[in-house]
Image (cartoon, rainbow, N blue to C red):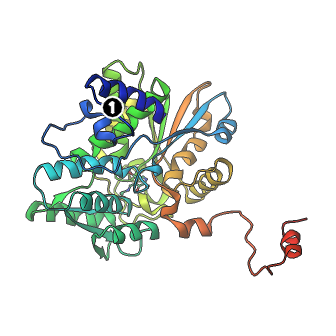
Amino acid sequence: MVNQLLQKLSKKINNKNKTFKQWPGLIQAYEKWLPINKNTPIITLQEGATPLIELESINKLIGKNVKVYAKYDGLNPTGSFKDRGMTMAISKAKENNCEAVICASTGNTSASAAAYAKRGNMRCYVLIPDGYVAQGKLAQALVYGAEILAIKGNFDKALKIVQEIAKNYPVTLVNSVNPYRLQGQKTAAFEIIDSLNEAPDWLCIPMGNAGNISAYWMGFNEYYKAGISKKLPKMMGFQAKGSAPLVLNKTIENPETIATAIRIGNPVNREKAIEVNKNSNGKFISVTDEEIINAYKLLGSKEGIFCEPASAASVAGLIKLKEYVVENSKIVCVLTGNGLKDPDCAIKNNDSIFKSGIDPSIEIVAKNMGF
Ligand code: F0G
């Protein structure tokens, strides 16, 4: 897929008599689709161009001759899809001479915001729910030099606070209410169509604040209107059962789930998500933590793909909706974040054999291997 994109891109760049030796990041790759101008400084870590991987075991599980693919966005530079939005949000913030950014986060936004802000030589403040951010994400924000404020409250509280702070102080908000975030994130839909030569029949995606599902829908629509895809997908949005405000159509005061990335009870993009559901003829359902973990283990042990629990909700939801899948469909499940983000979850939830305290002798090792 990267090759396909590179070919396209080199054509474009060749037209301008420039040669192009490596993927430049999504702003340059999709510049004509993005709100940038010649004064926009491009802050990039060469995000985007993530693989679309066919999932043989899920094909078999669903049957009906379907082809299921994972859009593995956990392979972005900071390990999540947030980088797509952040390259845009931070580049535009830089263009507007901003010196500091702020976000609330369940972990991935803060990691991404910190990385890109630092690359753009800006300060980065992050508000996180104390005790509910996976270790890998926290480690990233620390290493990237963010100024971290862990609050005694959940993500929804943190988001309310940063929205107020950004109104009253000279800091730019880089949560998905920042329109440039969704602009950057829509490029994932472009990449899927560039790979498949058409939109899939279903897009399966986890929802937290519902920014990403809105961004994908925007991207699919833009390519559709330009005639690059002849169809639009049904948007299948999944939430964790204990944090399912969009499924239950009400705010959840105390959201709970093992998938801390989507532990959100009051999604800020609620109205947009409702429109996406309606206009795409999609479905929003919830999946239990157990279903999420089963999909998570399946992806790891059968497909060699390590995603974080929130991401596995896309596959868990597809499995749950199996009976609605139409013969010969193409389905893309978005794997939003990398499994390394949440090592605690991985260590607690696997069926692998782990024997410790083994004597370092050939015989004993061989015996333990079952020989
Ligand atoms: N998957 C992962 C891995 C996430 O980190 C998030 C959101 C989502 C899915 C949901 O995306 O909010 O656009 O519907 N994470 C945010 C954060 C809230 O702070 O990192 P959404």
Task: Respond yes or no on whether mark 1 lies under 8 Å from ligand 1.
Answer: no
Using the image as rendered, state which of residue 213 and residue 288 is in the foreground: 213
Look at the image and tell me whether residue 193 can be seen: no
Q: Amino acid at mark 1?
A: Thr
Q: Is residue 178 above or below residue 55?
A: below
Q: Which residue is drawn at the image coordinates 66% and 27% (left, top)?
A: 65
Q: Is residue 259 left or right of residue 36?
A: right
Q: Which residue is drawn at the image coordinates 37% and 20% (left, top)?
A: 228
Q: Is residue 120 left or right of residue 19?
A: left
User: x, y percentage for residue 218?
Assistant: 31, 34
* Ligand 1 occupies quarter: bottom left
Q: Which residue is mark 1?
A: 19
Look at the image and tell me whether residue 331 can be seen: yes
Image quarter (top left, top right, bottom left or bottom right) of the C terminus: bottom right
Query: Which quarter of the picture shows residue 118?
Result: bottom left
User: x, y percentage for residue 203?
Assistant: 47, 36
Neighbour tally class for label 1: few under 14, some 14-19, many 20 plus, Cα within 10 Å: few
